[in-house]
Structures are given as C-alpha cells and as structure tokens.
Amino acid sequence: MSILTYIAGWPLLAALLLAVVPRNYRVILRAIAVLATLIPAVLAVKMFAQFVPGANGYQFEQQIPWVESLGISYHVGVDGLNVGLILMGAIVAFAAALCSWEIQTREKEFYILLLVMTGGILGAFASLDLFFFYFLHELALVPTFIMIGVWGRGEKKNYATFQITLYLSIGALIALIGLIALYLQSGANTFDIPKIIEHAKANPLAASAQNFIFPLLLFGFGILVSLWPFHSWAPLGYGVAPSPTAMLHAGVLKKFGLYGLIRIALPLLPQAAQSWAQVIAWLCVGNILYVGWVAMRQRDLNLLVGNSSVAHMGFIFLGIASLNIIGVTGAVLIMIAHGFLAALTFALSGYIYQQTGTLQISELGGLCRKLPFIGTALLMAAMAGCGLPGFANFAGEATVFFGAWVKFPAITIIALWGALVIGGVYMTRAIRNVLHGPLPEKWNSLADAANAWRKLPYALLLASLLIFGFAPKLLTDKINPDAEKILNQAAPIKLVAHTATSGARN
C-alpha cells in the first residue's frame, strides 16, 4: 500500500474513531486529533526525503479499480508538482491541530470536521483520478462552511458563511462542468489523469473544445482560489473563521485550484492556455494592486492578513500565465511557501485574539513587550510576506518575476512594484501599530506562549519558511523536471519553455 494512502487515510480513520469517543473525554479527543495529524506529517517528511527528482513516472503510486465501466479508480501518486504540496499540507494540518486549543465548545464535532478536512485535502493533492480529485476536494470544502458558521467569531460570521458557501459552491460547480466536459471531449473513456494526458498526446482536443473548457476551469478554479474580481469572499471568510480553519483553507485548500490548472488545464488544453495567458496575467494585476490597496486600508488585523493572502495569489497566477519552466516552477514554489506563511499568520492572529479579544489594530500596540515570542514570530511572518530574502516566499516570487519577464515585461514591472511598495507599506505599518509603540494598560496581563508545546506550531511553520528559503533547491530540483514535462505537452509551449530555460542558463 502506498505511503500516500496512509498520509490521507489516518485523519479520516481518526475522524471515525472520534465519532464513538464520548464528548466529555476532552483530553482524549484532542490527543487523537493531534496524533492523527502528526503521523501524516512524519510520513510526508519521509516521502519527501525519499522522492527522487526527475524519475520517470509517478512515485509511491497505487491504483485500485473502482467503477471500471466509467474508468474511475482510486489512483494516487506524486511527482515534483505535488510532493511539496502534500508535505506542506501535512505540516500545516499538524500545526492547525495544535492551535485548536482555542476551541472550547463542541470540541468533538470540531476535531471530526478538522480531520475530515485534512484527509480530503491530502487525498485531493495525491489523487491522479479526476473523480477522486474533485470528490476529495469537496469532502474537504464542506467542513469549512460548517466550522465558520458554528465556531466563527464576530457579528458578520453568518454573512461570511453564506457568502463563502455561495462563492465556493458556484466555483466548484463551474469547475465540475469543465471537468465533465473534459472527460467527454477527450475520448479517453477514463477519469485517470495520466491516461487522459497520454491519449491527448496522440489525439489533441480540438481548438473549439479547448476554448470552451479552459475558461470553465480557469474561472471555476479561479473562484476557489480568490482570483480577482471573484475574491471578496476570502478576506471576510478568513477574518471570522476559527484559526485552525483559516490555516487549513487559506494555507492549503485554496491551492487546489492552482494545482488543478497546472496539473490538468496546461497539458490538456495548451492552445487555449496560450490564448488566455494574457488575460490571466492582467487579472493577476487586480490581485496584486487592487487587493493590495484594499489591504492598506484595513483596520482589522485578520482582514489585513486575509487581503494579503489574496494579493499573493496574483504572483502564482502570473507564474502560471508565463507558460515557461521558470515561471511555473516559481508558481509551485510560492504555493508551498504561501501555505506555510498563511497558516503562520492566521495562527498568530488567532493567538492575539484569544489573549485580547480584539484584532482592531487601533486597540493594539506595544504587544512585543508582553508577547516577545508571538511578537517576534509575527514580525518574521510579516517580513516573509514582504518577500524578504531568506524566506521561501522570496525565492518563489523572484523565480516568478524572472519567468514572467520573458513574456510580460510591463506586467512584471507592475507586479514587482506592487510586491515591493504596496506589500511593504501595509505589512510594516501593521507591525509598527501592533507590536511597537506604547502598550495600553489593559494589556498588562497578557501572557506569551507558555511552553514549548504551545510554541511548537509557530516554530514549525516558521522553520519551514526558513529552511526552504535558505535552500530552495530542495523544492526546485523536484519541481523543475515535472514542470518541464507538463509544459512540453504542446509544441508552442515547448518553444517558450526552451527559450526561458536557455535564457536562464545564459
């Protein structure tokens, strides 16, 4: 049995186990949830270490036929595109479970939903079958709505729940229509992604079919990812969500749409991808500039972090739109780095909210005096969000800019200005107002993270950003060969990829 089955299966089995544990056994409930996320995290580290870059085919592969008449099977495997995403998702899930101490009501139900969400996320990223790819994403998405509606905070939680449910349901439906159309038009009579790609090599989809399916996938997945202008659900949803939910959704689940575009849309719909590249590039400017400006106006720390998270999606879309190896490799690298960063920032803001009862920036100030560990971690997270060298975000953004410059020099300059100026302004201003300056008397009783166990989730996420920041080759060496395979599915893309690679070597 593949290690991937264990990585995705342990949380789901633990969720079933929690269903029979009495709700008054709070310590046992929490221990099972933490252990059920720790085991996948350890297994994911082992898988990542054993992964061989550039190997032919998928690794740690397992396939079990299910509905043979439709070509549906349980098929999992990893290559350079998803091995880092699964590692990131497993680590973030473990950190989210550790941060769940803030949940004080209906803990049993919360941990069950958290584990179902974790299993669905990890299974979706590992799946090589279109049916399970979509089904497991939906399995992870439904708990998000419930957790925000039940355990969310603030007066707008009901509105946020309805909005995020409406937006993401519409996005998922549009993406489903695109995937069904892809299955029918491909003629491969299977949901198996590798087989569909192999069939498409010999029998490319007609241009008319590509131009019909690609926008469905682009805007369906785009809504799930908060592509501008379909992004307004994200900052508010994350602002009212409990910290573990925001960590998992903003950090991991939101990358599903981006991964779907790279894994499915680029190799199967290359002509349409070329046609839509310019549109994607200009839409990503909306994420970077408009949402960045909105972040500058925020007075709530969670809304600022939520808008910042949406703005960072623009850099990933820019890398995808470049359609060359450098840009796509950078896009995957940012997906992983942003997963760690979003989880870290929402975990830290959740800690501050639990201590102070507010995230209004005007009511905070001088927190570094009472919260030296949390304050330092928040400062480092803000610097990572600004793209400071030494963090994984810098390596990803720099790579995307190099890749995008080949195709969109003007847009790259705009994006670079947005990253350096707009991002720098709202992050440094927030840090100044939250962590520095005079400390209000009402915060004199605040308590920092008390022990190593409470500090572990923040330290783990921060260490991941630094490790991949100082040694990005740990990721890029794995991503690059399989990004090249994806881009070489069509001659026009192959030419662009070759040009970008040659330029990088020179």
Image: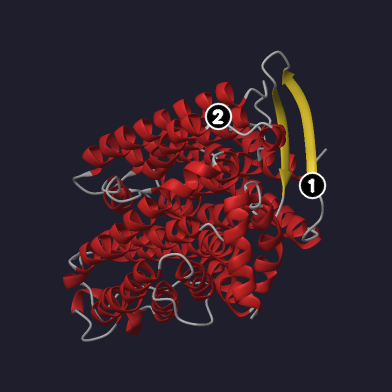
Q: Would residue 20 be visible to someone looking at this image?
A: no
Q: Which quarter of the image is occupied by the N terminus? A: top right
Query: Which residue corresponds to mark 2?
Result: 135
Q: Is residue 285 left or right of residue 188?
A: left
Number of on-image labels: 2
Q: Residue 130: x percent and y percent?
A: 60, 31
Along the viewing direction, whichever of 67 and 48 lies nearer the viewer: 67
Q: What residue occupies the far top of the structure in this picture?
A: 69
Along the viewing direction, whichever of 40 and 62 lies nearer the viewer: 62
Q: Residue 273: x percent and y percent?
A: 49, 46
Residue at 56% in and 24% down: 185
Residue 224, relative to residue 250: is it above or below?
Answer: above
Q: Would residue 445 be visible to someone looking at this image?
A: yes
Q: Which quarter of the image is occupied by the C terminus? A: bottom right
Please tell me how crowded label 1 is: few (under 14), some (14-19), or many (20+) other residues with Cα within 10 Å. Answer: few
Q: Is residue 20 left or right of residue 141?
A: right
Mark 2 and mark 1: Cα distance apart in space: 24 Å
Mark sitting earlier along the chain (2/1): 1
Q: Is residue 349 left or right of residue 13?
A: left
Residue at 64% in and 56% down: 483
